[in-house]
Image: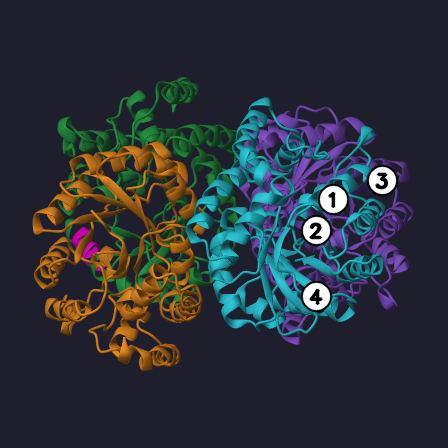
Chain colours: A cyan, B purple, C green, D orange
Amino acid sequence: MDVSGIFPALTTPYGEGGAVAIDYFKANLARYDQTGIAGFVVLGSTGESVLLSSTEAEALLIAAKEAAKPGKRLIAGTGAESTAETIARTKRAASIGFDVALVKTPFYYKPAYKPEVYLRHYRAVADASPIPVLLYSVPIFTGVSLETPDVLELAQHPNIIGIKDSSGVIQRVVEVVGQAPKRFQVLTGGASVVYPALAAGARGAILALGSALPERCVEIFDHFKRGQHAEAQALQQRLALASKTIVSENGIAGVKYAMDLRGYHGGMPRLPLLGLADEKKRQIADVVAQFEPSKATA
Amino acid sequence: MDVSGIFPALTTPYGEGGAVAIDYFKANLARYDQTGIAGFVVLGSTGESVLLSSTEAEALLIAAKEAAKPGKRLIAGTGAESTAETIARTKRAASIGFDVALVKTPFYYKPAYKPEVYLRHYRAVADASPIPVLLYSVPIFTGVSLETPDVLELAQHPNIIGIKDSSGVIQRVVEVVGQAPKRFQVLTGGASVVYPALAAGARGAILALGSALPERCVEIFDHFKRGQHAEAQALQQRLALASKTIVSENGIAGVKYAMDLRGYHGGMPRLPLLGLADEKKRQIADVVAQFEPSKATA
Amino acid sequence: MDVSGIFPALTTPYGEGGAVAIDYFKANLARYDQTGIAGFVVLGSTGESVLLSSTEAEALLIAAKEAAKPGKRLIAGTGAESTAETIARTKRAASIGFDVALVKTPFYYKPAYKPEVYLRHYRAVADASPIPVLLYSVPIFTGVSLETPDVLELAQHPNIIGIKDSSGVIQRVVEVVGQAPKRFQVLTGGASVVYPALAAGARGAILALGSALPERCVEIFDHFKRGQHAEAQALQQRLALASKTIVSENGIAGVKYAMDLRGYHGGMPRLPLLGLADEKKRQIADVVAQFEPSKATA
Amino acid sequence: MDVSGIFPALTTPYGEGGAVAIDYFKANLARYDQTGIAGFVVLGSTGESVLLSSTEAEALLIAAKEAAKPGKRLIAGTGAESTAETIARTKRAASIGFDVALVKTPFYYKPAYKPEVYLRHYRAVADASPIPVLLYSVPIFTGVSLETPDVLELAQHPNIIGIKDSSGVIQRVVEVVGQAPKRFQVLTGGASVVYPALAAGARGAILALGSALPERCVEIFDHFKRGQHAEAQALQQRLALASKTIVSENGIAGVKYAMDLRGYHGGMPRLPLLGLADEKKRQIADVVAQFEPSKATA
């Protein structure tokens, strides 16, 4: 199961009254299908998965399966705090037709979550899962991190095919790529370090920024593949600025607003997440505008 | 609504096959009812609330309402990541007959959770809640903290009656008690600092240790009330050691094992939480044994 | 060697051109001598010790010895990064006539400073020191902390008589007081938690705030000694607010400005520390004014 | 002033009795002179600068100036906590003949060190310095970090030519290189991320590992310069493992022991730093042995 390339971390659009808007969601996918992305990640952190009911979550998975162009990899976020619930969600995603389960670390009982806990949890999930599993470490949200020795241990499991590491710690990419089996694939979650991560041996990226600027995220991947160092470095600097303004400073509300500006269905996030102040909107508009001219030719 | 005194943070017992064991849960309450505790906290962090389905959670609330002796305060953990879901859970707890809602901070989208987000979230919940609201700040699990200025702001809301602060930061107790309206009640979540917290102006405590050693937790509160400084200080030192071994080092599994030793229905936690190694069990048994002789007379 | 009671952490005044002003320093001591403080701490963090030359440091020790009233305990900050340098400074302080050496943790090579390093360092210093040693843990500046097991281990050394713990972590006070030999004395460094720390078993405090408001810091200690709980709690709340504005938010510059307002020689700190903006000065003046009326009667 | 390339962060050897061994130090330099390194860093963190007297520090600068081959850049660590002392050390290094001053952040009074403090400090130093200044951010030791906006602000100063960023945060390299003037040079301090940092736009590295394995550190730089991506990536993985065992896990003692194994004068660090357990020595020996065969041909 090859998960190389660029994947947008999809957002969840809402309609009037705040219900999940499946039609908007499908419309977004139809447009992404026209870009060079490798596939889709549904129910990730950017998808507000922790703010959705299980019914809403399932509807989004079904919609993605229906809308995605054949050949695009379908990755479902299925991690829950409980091992049993994680397995249940993973099986459901598989039955709907998803290719890969992205399983974030349990994280609530941090002091109890010694490495042994993660090893047992992920092995239980990977044993039970009908589809390959991607580990998911996202310390900015969870406050916990999968460290290199744990990742290397889990990389031995035949049904664990890689990790999405959103820590931005490039040293871990170097260490894991250097020591894990060759089939184990590292994806970065940081749009500011895609090129350094690829240089370190990552196979691709799952990016919130990919929901707003998919063409440009694909472009940096292509520069790397072609050995265009100067172009990759220059584009990386621009994407870092865009990611800072859109994602780091404004979160999901920022990503959604940038999507609105680019003609996708972004909209507002769900409470307690708030919308953006006008000044923030202007800053995001400035950033998006810098990419528009070349987007036309992308 | 007076929430002074000592509240055990109740655990959730499981039966054969891992289902929630409502009968065990009720049996535990019946025994706690014989102690001097002020009431019960159901679905807190110690109750493995993040590992339960909504059906299981509701069954526990109903059981607690049925089992608790009249006059014991009933506090339900109702915090969810989404504001709407938190309100829904709070209304359900109220309709079941709970007295107070304990609402932990949303915490997943940490970088987006500026003070304004917490103010809006808690005000929306408190506005909608039929019962009084207790703020709940538990950084060891959530990685976020309600700071003094935010607490003081929220203390102005007529339906927010206090805070359970599990940070162990006594400075915050001093600051909040000193500046909030007199009706605003601070409860500590740290068994190692109950007496210093009371000295600082806290009204009581919600304690995981209270599920294993309720009599002793009540005893330190009584020492304080009677101005028995030397006794309170000495018992605090002993409780700190007990809390370290049972709670800090072994988490929910430790609390449940200590409960087993004392004749309650403790049992195993749910995965990914693991049971205890034999050495850990011995350490807990040693600690519990130190309290048994005097327990007999408590 | 009894170090109970309240000690101001002395500041270092500068004259025209920025040289240390020994006469101002002595004048401050002469006034402190009229209060109920137990003694003086020279060359602590508040004394800008890390910004002084060894010549300046020695001059301050000599001046304090000359100025202090007999019976006041003299405590010298002698901790350096190197063990040999710490011993040299400690011997020099002893030869000048100081009673106690306050030895902060080395802290630069954090990843290498395992507990074993601290045990060896402190034992080497305590073995070589002609005067008793107080451990000094001040994580807000050093980024490292002496944890309970290390403190308990070091408390066995006959020449280590206690610890100044500036972490504000009251749980550690409870643990150390409960388990260390009775002769081992815990002093807190946090003006916001003096009363809770005393309730937990601390013997006193070394306070930056004590340089500006020594009478009030002594007063809370006296309330505690007399069992005046309500008065202690109320004064603690006021001191917490004062400490926040003067010390936490404005650091040494804040302490010095508050001293200026109270007629001591405060003045400016040394660069890179900066002076205060006018608004900050006004806030400090407001706080100090709240204590003035009762200061007159103190 | 070009500071691109690889610089070893030199260690300080001691002789019998613990005095600095200038002859050993010079002998090390003579050997490094035969490699492809760009120059030397004296009195950095790896040089135990915080454990040396000012007399010892000056002797090391003089010795380095005498021993270094013409054309090798000479960089002196001159950062002290006080602005005045930093300027004095910088001027002394310049007068001895050093090319560049490496000025680490003051870090003791962390809560007071707002960005404004760092801007004023560095501008004062750069204004007064006869030689160009390199900023130095090393959070693992100092607990503080120069953030991108501060670096960009300081990059405008004509006498500040770059930064050594030892944080390992590659995102900051991308941001600074992308926005600072072209003349501003970023050097990484992390041997585990040299190649990703170069890919992100860094000009070189100052490495503790460079004192033990200078040829290999130079080799990865050369691979990058020649566009040999696969070779650079593969060597990076090996250097990351070496750096983990030698530097991250064993600190200065580890670097010095690896130097001993390679025929340099390493020796023991100064107390409170401790020597290595035998098992650690074996692990380091294993790592060094893996590089020996190719070292012969380097």
Q: Mark 3: few, some, or many residues within 10 Å (few <14, many ≥20)?
A: many
Overall secondary structure of the magenta stretch?
A: helix
Quarter location, residue B222:
top right
Q: Seen in the image, is A12 located left or right of residue D156?
A: right
Give the amino acid type for the residue marked by disc 4 in the picture.
His
Dots 3 and 1 on the same chain: no
Secondary structure state at the residue bearing disc 1: helix
Q: Are marks 4 and 3 in contact (CB under 8 Å)?
A: no
Give the amino acid type for the residue marked by disc 2 in the picture.
Phe
Q: Nearer the viewer, residue D90 or A231?
A: A231
Q: Which residue is mark 2?
A: A40
Residue A285: image x %, image y %? Answer: 57, 28
Dots 2 and 1 on the same chain: yes
Residue D269: image x %, image y %? Answer: 25, 68
Q: Nearer the viewer, mark 3 or mark 2?
A: 2
Which disc number belongs to residue A29?
A: 1
Q: Mark 2: few, some, or many residues within 10 Å (few <14, many ≥20)?
A: many
Figure check: B276 above or below B56: below
Figure check: D134 above or below B134: below
Quarter location, residue B119:
top right
The range drawn in magenta is C86-94
Q: Chain of mark 2?
A: A
Which disc number belongs to residue A121?
A: 4
Q: Quadrant of the C terminus of chain D?
A: bottom left
Q: Nearer the viewer, residue C70 or C77?
A: C77
Q: Nearer the viewer, residue B219 or A85?
A: A85
